[in-house]
Image (cartoon, grey):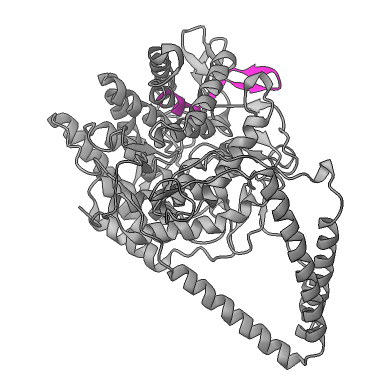
């Protein structure tokens, strides 16, 4: 995330070039309908025959399936008579050997029967006229459309809602702090109102050109990414009229049946995370329904030999692929490792274990793999299950994987001990191999590349200061104080990266090489695109220490954003933070409204707004409640309190 096409656009990873869909020869359109249909039937029968033959081949080590046992998980509101040990919950168990053999035999019989049926149907179809075939095709199309509509309208089961605490309020007692919070709210209004005027329905806004903007992570469709990403911030700030405008657009226009290839990671953290947060905050059922509809569209991305999902999936066809620039066709650690929070909540809200199973499968696979120096490489091939190049980073490509290990434990009311152990093991290896002190006494997190430590830290890695503070409580061998101090040191380093620029805004990455410390060297690393990670760390450190320096540093950043990034049509990133006369990039990122302004607002709010023992923020700053399974109520909550 170095050319403009590779700029990282959110939550901690690097988006790729938009290669677009492949083109096909035009002469194929000249085939008549009946000829195409007959060819399709013959091809289908041939594929069925080949697949059946392959299935009945003797077992071989090449063709072994991944059989990973799943931990038991509690999901509410399912009939206890269907195998649950306790009323109101059911348990998901790993497969046993006997059941597995029976299932394979059942599948063999089914494929044999389907194969014979397909051949008979093909023979019958070939006897019919072209008009009869056309009529049957239209009938089938109508049937599919009706089934899809019925599925979309099908109500989700009632679910126990966690006891939600601190979803509004947070008024600070200090008058000066209150004024600063009001200023952040006004900045949010400016960003939202201009998007409402000039970019409504588009994914993002170009505030200088005053028109919509989109990138390849959202595909080619107008999916209103800014609307979905910003709604919970509007709610938290008490901007309920604006919230209702966004809700109405989502009800009327948000459609996931589009022929568009999207980033699984980005759509998960921004759309699913945002919609789930909106549901919990407002109680409006439409947000839950839309989140589940979208999640179903992402599931085909997991159809790989290992279960590690593709980076991209076409929402209509379900076809997936990886970024062309990723090591040897690999999936990226931060992308497939940043699904757990949202997918567990999807299973919690729907009673469907499929989402939970997908993310637990990923965890189990990672646990079985060897790791060089106990570090997780950033690349994993979804076909072979092998690591790509040995590159480890707590910045882009790796970061939010570690964040979600910790937050899986927190979100489970600290009962997911497996996730906590994986987090502790990973952090110990990171501290041993990646965290160093510069000559000037600044603590930084480098990147491990093929046995060599690169002394460079990215803006994205600055989130780790907050992560270390958040994970201090519950750490091993009474090291809570150590990790809180480590978080504070990372916060100071990242503040220095801001303070050593002309604009008092931090560069995309900065080096620690000889006399150069916390400063960007390459021109392509001097930009600031309204990123939230440094302010995120300030907020966590404020919550845990109440040291006034974090509010002071946050206010410095807010003033710099107001002075250098605000334009008449919204807010824009800048291309060079070391130039006193900055050039704007003319993009108002959706995460600026979802994260940067939200963390600033929370920094100047009292601690009773979204308290951290009841809420866990996903990597896009969307708050999801801790699942206190013994502390739930079946009553919903009003749309707007």
The image shows residue 498 at horizontal and vertical percentages of: 41, 24
Quadrant of the drawing holding the N terminus = top right
Decide: is 353 above or below 444: below
Most foreground residue, 514 or 453: 453
Q: Is residue 57 left or right of residue 150?
A: right
Magenta-drawn stretch contains 163 = no
Tell me which residue sits at (69%, 41%) in the image. Answer: 325
Tell me which residue sits at (66%, 52%) in the image. Answer: 303
Most foreground residue, 512 or 142: 142
Tell me which residue sits at (43%, 32%) in the image. Answer: 415
- Tell me if residue 569 can be seen: no
Q: From which residue to which does the magenta span run?
A: 447-466
Residue 622 image-quadrant placement = top left
Most foreground residue, 4 or 155: 155
Tell me which residue sits at (46%, 8%) in the image. Answer: 441
Decide: is 149 above or below 507: below
Magenta-drawn stretch contains 465 = yes
- Tell me if residue 235 can be seen: yes
The image shows residue 144 at horizontal and vertical percentages of: 58, 76
Q: Is residue 184 left or right of residue 57?
A: left
The image shows residue 632 at horizontal and vertical percentages of: 30, 46
Q: Is residue 5 left or right of residue 637?
A: right
Decide: is 204 above or below 403: below
The image shows residue 215 at horizontal and vertical percentages of: 54, 51
């Amino acid at each position: 995330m170095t050319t403009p096409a590779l700029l990282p656009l959110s939550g901690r990873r690097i988006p790729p070039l938009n290669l677009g869909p492949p083109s096909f020869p035009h002469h194929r359109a000249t085939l008549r309908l009946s000829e195409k249909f007959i060819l399709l039937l013959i091809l289908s029968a041939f594929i069925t025959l080949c697949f059946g033959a392959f299935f009945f081949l003797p077992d071989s080590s090449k063709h072994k399936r991944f059989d990973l046992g799943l931990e038991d998980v509690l999901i509410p509101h399912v009939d206890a008579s269907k195998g649950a040990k306790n009323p109101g919950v059911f348990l998901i168990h790993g497969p046993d050997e006997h059941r597995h053999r029976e299932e394979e035999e059942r599948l063999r019989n089914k494929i044999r029967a389907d194969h014979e049926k397909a051949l008979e149907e093909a023979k019958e179809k070939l006897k019919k006229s072209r008009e009869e075939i056309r009529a049957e095709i239209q009938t089938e199309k109508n049937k599919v459309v009706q089934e899809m509509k019925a599925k979309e309208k099908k109500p989700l089961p009632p679910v126990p809602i966690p006891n939600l605490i601190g979803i509004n309020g947070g008024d600070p007692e200090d008058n000066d702090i209150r004024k600063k919070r009001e200023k952040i709210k006004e900045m949010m209004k400016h960003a939202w109102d201009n998007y409402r005027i000039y970019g409504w329905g588009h994914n993002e806004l170009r505030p200088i050109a005053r028109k919509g903007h989109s990138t390849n992570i959202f595909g080619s469709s107008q999916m209103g990414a800014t609307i979905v990403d910003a709604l919970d911030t509007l709610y938290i700030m008490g901007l309920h009229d604006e919230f209702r405008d966004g809700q109405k657009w989502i009800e009327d226009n948000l459609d996931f049946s589009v022929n568009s290839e999207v980033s699984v990671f980005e759509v998960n953290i921004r759309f699913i995370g945002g919609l789930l947060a909106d549901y919990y905050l407002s109680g409006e059922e439409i947000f839950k329904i839309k989140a589940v509809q979208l999640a179903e569209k992402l599931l085909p991305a997991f159809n790989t030999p290992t279960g590690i999902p593709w980076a991209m999936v076409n929402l209509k066809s379900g076809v997936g692929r990886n970024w062309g620039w990723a090591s040897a066709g690999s999936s990226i650690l931060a992308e497939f490792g940043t699904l757990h929070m949202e997918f567990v909540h999807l299973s919690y809200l729907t009673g469907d274990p499929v989402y939970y199973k997908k993310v637990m499968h990923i965890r189990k696979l990672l646990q079985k793999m060897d790791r060089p120096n106990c570090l997780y490489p950033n690349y994993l091939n979804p076909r072979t299950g092998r690591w790509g190049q040995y590159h480890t980073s707590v910045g882009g490509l790796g970061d939010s994987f570690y964040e979600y290990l910790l937050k899986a434990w927190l979100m489970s009311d600290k009962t997911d001990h497996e996730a906590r152990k994986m987090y502790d093991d990973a952090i110990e290896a990171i501290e041993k191999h990646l965290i160093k002190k510069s000559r000037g006494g600044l603590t930084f997190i480098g990147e491990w590349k093929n046995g060599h430590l690169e002394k460079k830290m990215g803006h994205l890695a600055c989130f780790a200061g907050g992560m270390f503070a958040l994970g201090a409580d519950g750490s091993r061998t009474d090291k809570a104080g150590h990790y809180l101090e480590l978080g504070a040191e990372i916060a100071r380093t990242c503040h220095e990266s801001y303070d050593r620029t002309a604009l008092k805004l931090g560069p995309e990455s900065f080096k620690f090489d000889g006399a150069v410390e916390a400063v960007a060297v390459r021109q392509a690393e001097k930009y600031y695109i309204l990123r939230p990670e440094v302010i995120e760390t300030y907020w966590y450190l404020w919550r845990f220490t109440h040291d006034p320096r974090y509010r002071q540093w946050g206010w410095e950043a807010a003033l710099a954003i107001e002075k250098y990034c605000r334009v008449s049509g919204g807010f824009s990133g800048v291309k060079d933070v070391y130039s006193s006369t900055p050039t704007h990039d003319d993009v108002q990122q959706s995460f600026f409204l979802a994260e940067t302004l939200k963390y600033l607002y929370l920094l100047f709010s009292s601690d009773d707004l979204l308290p951290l023992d009841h809420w866990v923020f996903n990597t896009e700053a969307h708050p999801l409640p801790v699942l206190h399974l013994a502390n739930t109520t079946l009553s919903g909550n009003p749309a707007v309190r």
